[in-house]
Image (cartoon, rainbow, N blue to C red):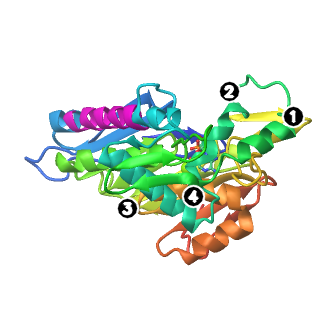
């Protein structure tokens, strides 16, 4: 066995294994995995196209990268030129007309908010002025500041006008951000762009949000390893996937520590405090965007409510690693233990 991919996502490490193999048929060119790793949306992205046609594979990979870059320009809340920033600037002032694409992404985000009873909420972002996970924070934010910010979080105050394609954030100081759904959306789109160009098998890993279609170059299913949280070099279990997304939330580079307690970068919209109790959440489902949003939601809901939600959703499975390194899974997750 030769390891052809090694993707480390903090305590969860996912890697895809494959076998090198001889030509399957004479006179037929061998399908190969072509692969590019780069930083996009502030994260490590990996785009893989399996094809016997080298130039088509590279054309598709480059088209996928262009697509992700385009999406980033549209949805980034850091880029002052993005439509998202325009919506945020006009919070409490006026409605802003946006592209159909952004409008639909916001509408889908609101659906997830309803499904998760507000655990997932793109308006969490008004609190990002208070919690900073880039190492710049020196002390715990004052409770009053947190309370004032929480008052600005409420997805029900994101008003969409279907006819005019406008978005209005009802309260001044409100802000939206797509940190918990944007990478999943970008992974979906990158896959669609590659498929439209004729790539029958591939993989897009958008900073831990991974979507795979078809099979590896040797005809085997993609296999994703889940590392043991106690020892990252050990594989805890395998997931064999075909036409599925596997999305992991739990970014251990982004956290703050006060009085020995770790605060992760996912915010509970009700309290304004970062979530505790869960180290990482992996969602397996056909759609990377839904998986991305649900992974964040399970973090906020916690182990019990999170698993109960996932068990109600057909075709969606989940693996949670708790702060105590316990592994909890949804009812129908099929893991192959080593
Ligand atoms: P990761 O960054 O590990 O892939 P997520 O997909 O869960 O994890 O995204 C976390 C990001 O989502 C945060 O950095 C922040 O931008 C945003 N976020 C934090 N809390 C929430 C929330 N309750 N609802 C929606 N988005 C959130
Ligand atoms: Mg997410």
Disc 4 to disc 3, C-alpha distance: 37 Å
Q: Taken as a whole, is the magenta stretch helix, strand or loop?
A: helix
Residue 213 found in image quarter: bottom left
> Which circle marks residue 192 in the picture?
none
In the image, is 113 to the left or to the right of 140?
left
Q: Circle 1 sits on which residue? A: 258
Residue 38 found in image quarter: top left
Q: Is residue 105 visible?
A: yes
Choose the circle earlier in sequence order: 4 or 1.
4
Choose the circle earlier in sequence order: 2 or 1.
2
Choose the circle earlier in sequence order: 4 or 3.
4
Which numbered disc, 3 or 1, marks the residue closer to the eye?
1
Disc 2 to disc 3, C-alpha distance: 36 Å
Q: Position of residue 27 (x, y in %)?
A: 7, 47
The answer to whether mark 4 is within 8 Å of ligand 1 is no
Say what secondary structure mark 2 lies in.
loop
Magenta segment = 59-75
Estimate how packed mark 1 is, as few (under 14), some (14 to 19) or many (20 or more) residues with alpha carbons within 10 Å: few
For the point 79% across and 44% down, which residue is it?
147
Choose the circle earlier in sequence order: 2 or 3.
2
Choose the circle earlier in sequence order: 2 or 4.
2
Estimate how packed mark 2 is, as few (under 14), some (14 to 19) or many (20 or more) residues with alpha carbons within 10 Å: few
Choose the circle earlier in sequence order: 3 or 1.
3
Of residues 324 and 307, which is closer to you in this image? 307
Q: Circle 2 sits on which residue? A: 134
Q: Circle 3 sits on which residue? A: 242
Of residues 179 and 38, which is closer to you in this image? 179
The answer to whether mark 2 is within 8 Å of ligand 1 is no
> Which circle marks residue 156 in the picture?
4
């Amino acid at each position: 066995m030769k390891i052809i991919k090694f993707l480390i996502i903090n305590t969860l490490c996912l890697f895809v294994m494959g076998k090198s193999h001889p030509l399957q048929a004479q006179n037929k060119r061998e399908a190969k995995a072509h692969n590019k790793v780069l930083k996009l949306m502030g994260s490590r992205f990996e785009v893989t196209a399996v094809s016997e046609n080298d130039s088509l594979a590279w054309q598709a990979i480059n088209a996928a990268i262009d697509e992700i870059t385009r999406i980033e320009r549209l949805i980034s809340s850091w880029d002052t030129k993005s439509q998202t920033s325009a919506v945020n600037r006009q919070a409490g002032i006026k409605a802003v007309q946006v592209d159909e694409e952004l409008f639909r992404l916001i509408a889908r985000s609101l659906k997830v908010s309803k499904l998760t009873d507000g655990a997932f909420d793109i308006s969490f972002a008004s609190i990002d002025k208070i919690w900073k996970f880039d190492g710049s924070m020196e002390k715990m934010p004052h409770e009053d500041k947190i309370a004032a910010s929480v008052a600005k979080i409420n997805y029900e105050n994101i008003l969409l006008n279907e006819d005019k394609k406008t978005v209005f954030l009802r309260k001044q100081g409100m802000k939206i951000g797509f940190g918990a759904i944007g990478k999943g959306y970008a992974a979906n789109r990158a896959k669609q762009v590659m498929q439209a160009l004729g790539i029958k098998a591939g993989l897009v890993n958008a900073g831990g949000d991974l979507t795979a279609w078809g099979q590896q170059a040797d005809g085997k299913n993609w296999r994703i390893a889940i590392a043991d949280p106690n020892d990252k070099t050990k594989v805890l279990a395998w997931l064999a996937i075909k036409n599925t997304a596997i999305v992991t939330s739990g970014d251990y580079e982004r956290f703050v520590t006060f009085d020995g307690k770790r605060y992760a970068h996912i915010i509970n919209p009700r309290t304004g405090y970062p979530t505790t109790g869960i180290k990482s959440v992996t969602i397996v489902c056909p759609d990377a965007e839904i998986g991305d949003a649900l992974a964040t939601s399970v973090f906020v809901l916690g182990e019990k409510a999170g698993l109960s939600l996932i068990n109600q959703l057909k075709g969606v499975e989940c693996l949670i690693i708790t702060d105590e390194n316990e592994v909890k899974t949804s009812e129908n997750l099929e893991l192959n233990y080593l």
